[in-house]
Image: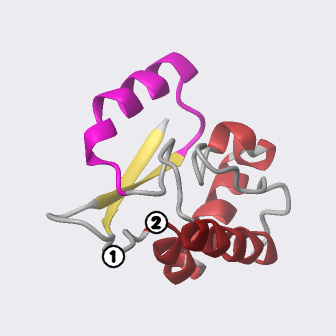
Amino acid sequence: MHAQQRPQRLPGPGPVRRLHLWGQPEPEQWLKTLNACKDLQPPGTLSADRTPEQQSASLKFVQCIRDHGVRDFPDPVNGEPLVDTTTIPSTDTEDGTRILNAAMDACRDLGDAAIESQP
């Protein structure tokens, strides 16, 4: 698996970097990593519950991702990750992952709205 890190601004304190993955991590290792970083997750990401406003924004984000070529991007389910590549069959290939990364970049503002903390 190859990884590339690029800075990305996300809501919350401190610098955050986005990890681009080509290929799939082993599910057991991925879950272990997610659990180790659980306290650092912004609201609305991974397994955090989203507010109604965040869930509405999540639907717009998902439609944007689909419009940018990831047709098999699943509907957002509250309480489940907003982006989980293990549920997106097209990301099983390097090209599919690149298409997802490009879509994520194009839909960044909508993604930010989906995970923003509500006042």
Residue hosting label 2? 115
Assess whether residue 101 is covered by the magenta stretch: no
Percent position of residue 62, x then y: 71, 67
Identified at 59% across, 78% down, the residue is: 107
Q: In this view, does 21 lie above or below 71?
A: above
Percent position of residue 84, x then y: 61, 44
Closest to the observer: 65 or 21? 65
Percent position of residue 9, x then y: 31, 74
Q: Say if residue 68 shows up in the picture.
A: yes
**Mark in the foreground, 2 or 1:** 1
Point out the stretch of residues depicted in magenta: 22-42
Q: Say if residue 102 shows up in the picture.
A: no
Identified at 47% across, 46% down, the residue is: 48
Quarter location, residue 66: bottom right
Percent position of residue 24, x then y: 59, 34
Closest to the observer: 105 or 61? 61
> Amino acid type of disc 1?
Pro
Identified at 52% across, 50% down, the residue is: 49
Residue hosting label 1? 119
Assess whether residue 34 is covered by the magenta stretch: yes
Q: In which quarter of the image is the C terminus?
A: bottom left
> Amino acid type of disc 2?
Ile
Q: Describe the colour scheme in one phrase.
A: secondary structure
Q: Is residue 28 above or below residue 48?
A: above
Label 1 Cα neighbours within 10 Å, binned few <14 / some 14-19 / many ≥20: few
Farthest right residue? 71
